[in-house]
Image (cartoon, rainbow, N blue to C red):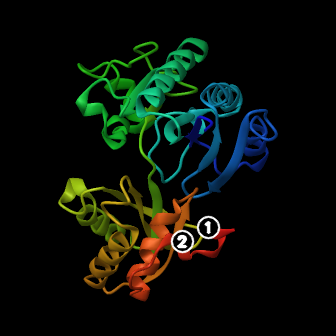
Amino acid sequence: MAKIIECIPNFSEGRDKVTIDKIIDTLRGREGIKLLDYSSDKDHNRTVVTFVGAPEMVYEGILAMADKVYEYIDMRKHNGEHPRMGALDVVPIVPVSDVTMDECIELAKRVGKEIAKKYNVPVYLYEDAATKDNRRNLAVVRKGQYEGFFQKIKEEGWEPDFGPREMNEKSGCAAIGARVPLVAFNVNLDTDNIEIAQNIAKVVRHIGGGLRYVKAMGVELKERRIVQVSMNLVNYEKTAVYRAFEMVKIEAKRYGVNVIGSEVIGLVPMAALIGCAEYYLQIENFSQDQILEKRI
């Protein structure tokens, strides 16, 4: 069985299609790499990419992509609803087939070291690749965002794992990590009141006393004049997608607002959606072997 790793880089540009295409072009048709998906959001001003390949091919793909990211994105001009601290903001590396988490951690370290050296960018390792317990949670690492990191990087305990202890004004800094698959899941509300979305996010996320494997925040979708609860389900097997969805609906009722839709960002494991089907349809004794496409 071939070794396969999934990589989901997030870069801080979601509005300029020409720039986005130039960055994505580094992966299109690249030998040893399969580009699975990419999606851009104007409100978040962010693009999320998903590609897979053998470890060495993924390593080369990330660096090829980084070349264009650091050439075209200037963080001094960036604004958006999504938290960010750098042009190549976060690079998660995920084991898929015949690859251990330890191998993904080593790859994350290689990538981080090279990016720091080549682009003079401070790099932080997070999740399973973290070198300190307080760096496992990406939200903690990214707290303060690009603007706040000029001071944060000088504080005790916040020296980068690789690169200079000084922010790169144009490129910011980067987080490179190894983790299990997650589901990026957003729920839209029929209101433009951001405080409502923020309040719901506070009680849904684990750090606020909510669901154990959920990170959440309130986001404005200005073009649509609505708000959303934007979530990362970091372990969908232990905190199911439908459970997070239902909790948002319950909390929304307190404010007299309704859920008007939801979205998945990037790719999602089939099992996560099957779990939703089983729950809402109350299917008994369902097996993945009953899925037509799985039997072909």
Measured as percent of width and height from the top left, residue 238 is found at: 30, 60
| Image location of residue 180, percent across then percent down | 42, 45
Residue 258 visible in the snapshot? no
Of the numbered discs in the image, which one, if any, rests on residue 294?
1
Quadrant of res 61: top right
Query: Marks 1/2: CA distance?
Result: 6 Å
The residue at the point 65 percent across, 43 percent down is 51
Q: Mark 2 points at which residue?
A: 289
Name the image quarter holding residue 24: top right
Local packing at callout 2 (Cα closer than 10 Å; few below 14, some 14-19, many 20+) is: few
Q: Would you place residue 228 above or below residue 191 in this image?
A: above
Task: Please state which amino acid type lies under the numbered disc 1.
Answer: Lys
Can the viewer see residue 4 in this picture? yes
The answer to whether marks 1 and 2 mark residues whose Cβ atoms lie closer than 8 Å is yes
Label 2 residue SS? helix
Outermost residue toward the left? 209
